[in-house]
Amino acid sequence: MNYTVKTVAQATTSSVIQSQRGASVSGIVFFVLALGVFVKLAIAILPAQIGNYQFNKTVANELKKANDNKESSREFMQNLSQQLSLNADYSSKPEEMLTFTNNKTGSLAVRSKYEVVNNFFGNVDIVNRFEKDITMNDAK
């Protein structure tokens, strides 16, 4: 008869290796923290990106309408202010967010340049800066 003798250290090591499967507690905690930071970043960034997309589309549509109707830049800004007050809640006025790159009646073009600041945590803010040339060709 052959008997194999294992020391206590060998038996403990092999049972620990066999029983260690899956994620450890520290791995799960790290995953939950990383997921929380990712969700917090998404909550801080996505609304500003969606708002910028909607703002650009609204400006492009109003620009196309103004150019088709041969409106002046002043009439365009009045119509845009009225449209934004109906459709959205912007803390800034269109006059502060837009500058004209082409001021000719019938071929108006603007450049949007503004930023949106969201609090991430404590005194850490996320600043989203948006800058784009908008023409009536952007309206679809």
Image (cartoon, grey):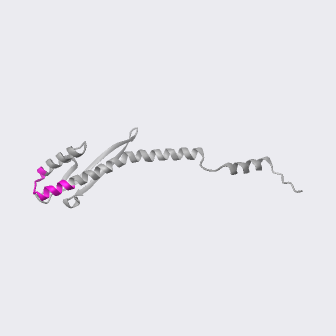
Pick the front one: 111 or 84:
84
- The answer to whether one can see residue 31 in this image is yes
- The answer to whether one can see residue 100 in this image is no
Query: Residue 112 appears at what percent x and percent y?
Result: 23, 53
The quadrant the N terminus occupies is bottom right
Q: Which residues are magenta?
A: 60-75
Classify residue 54 as left or right of residue 38: left
| Picture quadrant of residue 117 | top left
Vertically, is 5 above or below 122?
below
- Residue located 13% across and 58% down the image: 67
- Residue located 25% across and 51% down the image: 55
Query: Residue 48 appears at what percent x and percent y?
Result: 32, 48
Classify residue 89 as left or right of residue 9: left
Majority secondary structure of the magenta segment? helix
Query: Residue 128 appears at what percent x and percent y?
Result: 33, 49
The quadrant the C terminus occupies is bottom left
Does the segment drawn in magenta span residue 5?
Answer: no
Query: Residue 34 appears at what percent x and percent y?
Result: 49, 47
Classify residue 128 as left or right of residue 58: right
